[in-house]
Image (cartoon, helix red, strand yellow):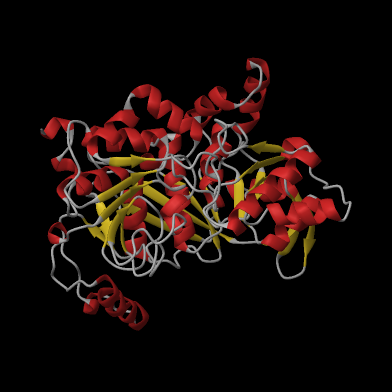
């Protein structure tokens, strides 16, 4: 029997039929639904009197995209009439069809890619889809998880399967030991800076190496989340003892059942001599905290560096993008990141809003205040994270520092809270910094939660290492 990759093992286990053009019909094991892509698909089936093929245990639904995170709105609802209608439609359909729906103030509510894993819904070796581009986040568990469009959501509901184009395989090996103050978000931004946003286009990317092995599950989810910015629908990390320890805490199963499942999951890894279509290695042992300067996640540099000149980009398209980015971001080549003042700071999103992210930011904020004139906001990734942060005193640290402490949801990752940052410069723990992403003419700098916290205190882009407790 020939050696195979982790991806090939999962693909083969779910392929129902091979099709021309290197496509296949794949069985889909589980799906998360949110109000933007899931509510209407369920509604149309309910109105038509159709019964979805997926069982109750195969669906987890939550309203996260359109929902307001404002803590003083009473009912956790949307800021817009359309958003509220989407949320109501998703809730009614789930109730009528018997699917699990995490109501907005339930502890299980949150951003799909945060609350799903917390609820034990994501397992190694499964196929998993969601109508969101960052579904690859949960590939950190060794699941073949990928984004689908609204029509594909409906197809999965009706058929329990989907026709998928088979991707190539790309292995990214990360070596070295991360320095203090450097986290998986920095690793992802460095990968993008060195290899660009088309790095994994047409491929499933498997992250491996000593750096990945040392990461927590939450850090792995951040890395896989950012794979969406590398041009792929798919990211994978082989499950290991870190994965199994996490799952033992969240999966509602007896120890005996978990032990049996784990025994099977141990085989979910690429064989030592498996061949990949592409191989990339990166040593991140000397990496510093990263911050973006432009309008692409690939525009990342060390926090203590200067804004590059467009001429440093060899490809004409990258040169043109850099030139345009400088104009939009209102920056000059050679300008030090540390001299760039900010108007706002945001910690949240499916990338960096888990409890470990909030702990890291709180360690910087504790006993300090954000700079005068800076508006800072934190939206925990789930109501469970929010409750845990409240219990640990983290919420009090954020509030005392001057951050708005909000409810859970996608929030201002994509300007969902309205144009509150219009024309402002924001440092953000999110995954995208495209023009107008966080609001009209908002200029976004991507960074880790600790870097966001440090910058909020300084009132400018700041190195988190200067604010770490041991540096005080």
Residue 445 found in image quarter: bottom left
Provide residue 339's location: percent of width, then percent of height.
12, 60
Q: In this view, does 198 lie above or below 269?
A: below
Provide residue 86's location: percent of width, then percent of height.
65, 54
Q: Could you tell me if residue 164 is visible in this image? A: no
Residue at image point 28% right, 38% down: 361
Residue at image point 53% right, 40% down: 110
Q: In this view, does 134 lie above or below 401?
A: below
Q: Considering depth in this image, is 175 or 471 the residue closer to the camera?
A: 471
Taking the view exactly as shown, the residue that stands out farthest to the right is 49
Q: Could you tell me if residue 290 is visible in this image? A: yes
Q: Considering depth in this image, is 413 or 292 the residue closer to the camera?
A: 413
Q: Is 339 left or right of 111, judged from the image as shown? A: left
Residue 260 found in image quarter: top right
Q: Considering depth in this image, is 186 or 346 the residue closer to the camera?
A: 346
Provide residue 44's location: percent of width, then percent of height.
79, 57
Q: Is 306 left or right of 256, judged from the image as shown? A: left
Residue at image point 83% right, 50% down: 46
Q: Considering depth in this image, is 6 or 79 the residue closer to the camera?
A: 79
């Amino acid at each position: 029997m020939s050696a195979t990759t982790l991806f090939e093992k999962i693909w083969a286990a779910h392929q129902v039929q091979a099709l021309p053009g290197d496509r296949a019909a794949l069985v889909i094991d589980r799906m998360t639904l949110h109000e933007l892509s899931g509510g209407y698909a369920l509604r149309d089936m309910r109105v038509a009197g159709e019964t979805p093929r997926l069982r109750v245990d195969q669906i987890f639904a939550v309203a996260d995209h359109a929902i307001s995170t404002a803590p003083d709105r009473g009912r956790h609802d949307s800021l817009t009439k359309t958003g509220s209608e989407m949320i109501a439609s998703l809730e009614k359909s789930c109730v009528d069809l018997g699917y699990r729906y995490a109501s907005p103030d339930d502890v299980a509510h949150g951003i799909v890619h945060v609350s799903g894993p917390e609820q034990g819904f994501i397992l190694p070796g499964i196929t998993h889809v969601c109508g969101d581009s960052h579904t690859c986040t949960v590939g950190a568990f060794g699941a073949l998880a990928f984004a689908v469009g609204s029509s594909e959501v409906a197809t999965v509901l009706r058929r329990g399967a989907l026709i998928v184009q088979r991707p190539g395989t790309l292995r990214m090996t990360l070596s070295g030991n991360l320095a203090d103050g450097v986290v998986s978000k920095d690793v992802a931004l460095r990968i993008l800076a060195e290899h660009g946003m088309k790095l994994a286009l047409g491929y499933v990317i498997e992250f491996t190496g000593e750096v990945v092995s040392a990461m927590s599950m939450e850090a792995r989810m951040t890395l896989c989340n950012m794979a969406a910015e590398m041009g792929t629908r798919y990211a994978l990390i082989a499950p290991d003892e870190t994965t199994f320890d996490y799952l033992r805490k969240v999966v509602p199963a007896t120890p005996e059942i978990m032990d049996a499942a784990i025994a099977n999951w141990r085989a979910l890894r690429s064989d030592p001599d498996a061949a990949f279509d592409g191989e990339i290695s990166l040593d991140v042992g000397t990496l510093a905290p990263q911050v973006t300067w432009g309008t692409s996640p690939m525009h990342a540099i060390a926090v203590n560096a200067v804004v590059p000149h467009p001429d440093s980009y060899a490809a004409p398209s990258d040169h043109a993008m850099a030139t345009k980015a400088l104009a939009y971001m209102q920056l000059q080549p050679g300008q030090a990141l540390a001299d760039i003042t900010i108007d706002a700071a945001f910690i949240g999103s499916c990338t960096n809003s888990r409890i470990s992210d909030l702990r890291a930011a709180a360690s910087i904020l504790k006993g300090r205040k954000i700079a005068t004139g800076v508006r800072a906001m934190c939206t925990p990734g789930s109501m469970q994270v929010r409750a845990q942060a409240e219990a640990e005193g983290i919420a009090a640290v954020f509030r005392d520092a001057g951050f708005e402490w909000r409810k859970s949801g996608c929030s201002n990752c994509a300007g969902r809270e309205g144009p509150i940052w219009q024309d402002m410069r924001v440092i953000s723990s999110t995954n995208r910094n495209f023009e107008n992403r966080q609001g009209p003419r908002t200029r976004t700098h991507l960074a880790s939660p600790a870097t966001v916290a440090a910058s909020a205190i300084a009132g400018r882009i700041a190195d988190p290492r200067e604010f770490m407790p041991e540096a005080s």
